[in-house]
Amino acid sequence: MRPKSVNERKIEAVNNKTIIGVKDTKITVLAHNQDDYISLTDMAKGFDGSLALIEQWLRNKDTIEFLGIWERINNSPAFNSIEFEGIKNEAETNRFYLSAKKWIEATNKIRI
C-alpha cells in the first residue's frame, strides 16, 4: 500500500486546529462549537498574488452582504449593524477598500 500524498491526507491535528494538505498547500481548519472554519488566507497562498486576491474578495459588494448575513446569524447581538450598513453603502464606490482589520474593528465581528 502506497503512502498518501499531501494532496490526500490530514497532516496534523492539535486541539481544535487541523492542518490538511490540498495540492501541496497546507490549509488550517479550525473547529469551534461543532463547526469547522477553513482558512481563506491559507487557501489563497496556493495562488500567485494571494494578498491581492483576498483584498479584491473583500471589496466585492456580494462578499460584504454575505459577511453581514453571517455575522447577524452568528454574532448577533454584538454585531454593529449600523457600521455594517455604512460599509455596505461604501462598497458601491470605486474608492472602497476593506481590510480584515477594518471589518473586525467596525462591526465587532467574530472572525473572517
Image: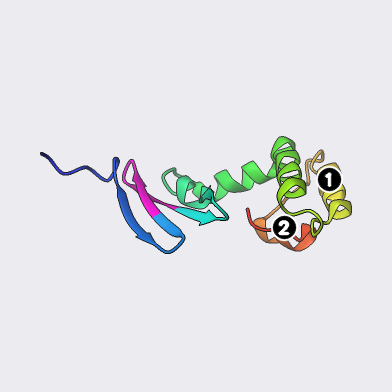
Residue 33: where, in percent of width, then height? 58, 55
Of the numbered discs 2 and 1, the one sitting upstream in the chain is: 1
Residue beneath label 1, please?
90
Front tag of 2 and 1: 2
Residue beneath label 2, please?
109
Q: Element under label 2? A: loop
> Considering depth in this image, is 15 or 61 the residue closer to the camera?
15
Question: Which amino acid type is shown beneath numbered disc 1?
Answer: Glu
The mark found on residue 32 in the picture is: none
Query: Is disc 1 surrounded by few (<14), some (14 to 19) or many (20+) residues within 10 Å?
Result: some
Task: Kindly identify the residue that appears in the image at 43 percent across and 64 percent down.
Answer: 15
Question: Which amino acid type is shown beneath numbered disc 2?
Answer: Lys
| Inter-mark Cα distance, 2 to 1 | 18 Å
12 vs 91: above or below:
below
Main structural element of the magenta stretch: helix, strand or loop?
Answer: strand
The residue sitting at the left extreme is 1
